[in-house]
Image (cartoon, rainbow, N blue to C red):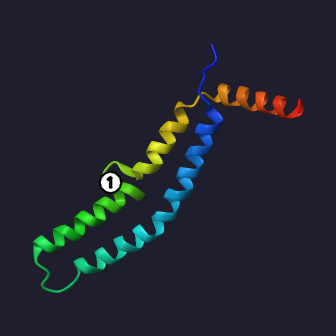
Amino acid sequence: MPIRWNTIAVSEALDEIEKHINQIYEPLKQAKAVAKQAIKLPDLPQYIEQRFRGIIGEVERVTGGVSYSGAYPGIFKRLIDRARDDIPKQEIERQQGRGKQQVLSL
């Protein structure tokens, strides 16, 4: 039984979201670099260093990073990839074919 929701619209929405998310990566990576430099400031109290490390950790959670188990993608990339994996590929192809037929019949 074919699904009723528009897989093409969902795929296009994910593409648009990914486009916007990609625009925030570079500023976040720059913020991470500043935080890493700030940690090296002389006589920095440990409680302030912990705040900078928290910023670094959150940036890595969003943009991706490396842990003991290896490299991992950022949270947004993971969520977008999971959503794309949930879209039935055959249904996208079926709906794309139906869209072409509708255009040809106009």
The quadrant of the picture occupied by the N terminus is top right
Q: Is residue 6 visible?
A: yes
Q: Residues within 10 Å of mark 1 (few under 14, many from 20)?
A: few
Q: Quadrant of residue 63?
A: bottom left
Query: Where does label 1 land, which residue?
Result: 67
Whole-percent x, y for residue 97 in the image: 78, 29
Q: Is residue 2 above or below residue 73?
A: above
Whole-percent x, y for residue 43 in the image: 12, 85
Say whether residue 23 is left or right of residue 50: right
Q: Nearer the viewer, residue 94 or 32?
A: 94
Say whether residue 86 is left or right of residue 67: right
Q: Is residue 64 visible?
A: no
Which SS class for mark 1? strand
Q: Residue at x 30, y 74 (%)?
A: 36
The quadrant of the picture occupied by the C terminus is top right
As drawn, which residue projects farthest toward the right? 105
Q: Residue at x 35, y 62 (%)?
A: 59
As drawn, which residue projects farthest toward the front? 106
Q: Residue at x 38, y 51 (%)?
A: 70
Q: Is residue 85 above or below residue 15?
A: above
Q: Residue at x 51, y 42 (%)?
A: 81
Q: Nearer the viewer, residue 99 or 86?
A: 99
Q: Quadrant of residue 14?
A: top right
Whole-percent x, y for residue 29 in the image: 41, 69
Q: Is residue 90 above or below residue 83?
A: above
Whole-percent x, y for residue 10 in the image: 58, 38
Say whether residue 67 is left or right of residue 87: left
Q: How many marks?
A: 1
Q: Nearer the viewer, residue 61 or 4?
A: 4
Say whether residue 29 is left or right of residue 81: left
